[in-house]
Image: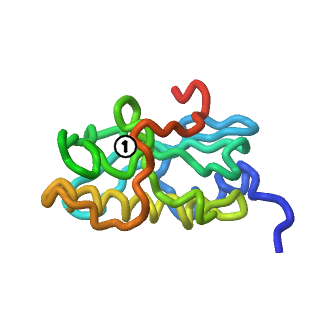
């Protein structure tokens, strides 16, 4: 049993082993950003995963860099469902914080990346049907998550 959460170095090593095509865009003692491409079904998405030791409880932040997420204004589930800060800088909602589905004792390579692939698959289906079939609770559209400062 691990008594301490995985370190940034642990997370980086696990990501390199499981997802070798994800590049580290920035790495410092307490924070890291990976960029890589994922293809759930029909499209390839470039994503960014940001994580710092301050996010051990909140979890990594995942953004789609390209193609830009399409909005469906007037959709009852929101113009982009299952994101935080959807009106400005969407961060994917990959797990329910109230159900403690994420913790720093879990590896990003085993949780966040597969969850992102699942989210993107649900998103593609949502674009076709207007219905989010991914389950879960929708976060508040104005909800804001912590950010890793100076992401670029």
* Left or right for 31, reference 145: right
Residue 93, horizontal then vertical, whole percent: 45, 52
Q: Which quadrant of the view contains residue 124?
A: bottom left
At 45% from the left and 63% from the top, the residue drawn is 115
In the picture, residue 87 is in which quadrant? top left
Task: Please state the horizontal and vertical placement of residue 117, each as a whole percent of the image.
Answer: 38, 61
Q: Residue at x 71, y 48 (%)?
A: 8
Quadrant where the N terminus is found in the figure = bottom right
| Residue 144 sits above or below residue 130 on the image | above
Residue 135, given in percent of the width and then of the height, sits at 37, 67
Q: Nearer the viewer, residue 7 or 145?
A: 145
- In the rendered structure, the answer to whether residue 141 lies left or right of residue 102 reads left
Which element carries disc 1, helix, strand or loop? strand
Tag 1 residue? 64
Q: Residue furthest right?
A: 3
Which is nearer the eye, 112 or 8? 112
Up-down relation of residue 64 to residue 138 (above or below): above
Nearest the eye: 89 or 72: 72
Q: Quadrant of residue 30?
A: top right
State the residue at coordinates (61%, 51%).
59
């Amino acid at each position: 049993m691990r008594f301490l959460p995985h370190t940034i170095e642990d997370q980086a090593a696990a990501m390199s082993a499981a997802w070798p095509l994800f590049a580290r865009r920035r790495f410092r003692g307490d924070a890291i950003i990976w960029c890589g491409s994922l293809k759930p079904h029909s499209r390839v998405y470039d994503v960014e995963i940001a994580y710092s030791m301050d996010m051990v409880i909140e979890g990594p932040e995942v953004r789609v860099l390209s193609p830009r997420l399409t909005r469906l204004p007037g959709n009852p589930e929101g113009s982009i469902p299952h994101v935080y800060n959807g009106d400005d800088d969407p961060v994917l909602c990959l797990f329910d914080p109230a159900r403690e589905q994420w913790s720093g004792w879990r590896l990003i390579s085993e949780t966040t990346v597969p969850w992102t692939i699942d989210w993107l698959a649900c998103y593609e289906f949502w674009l076709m049907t207007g219905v989010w079939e991914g389950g879960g609770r929708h976060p508040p559209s104005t909800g804001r998550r912590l950010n890793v400062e100076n992401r670029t």
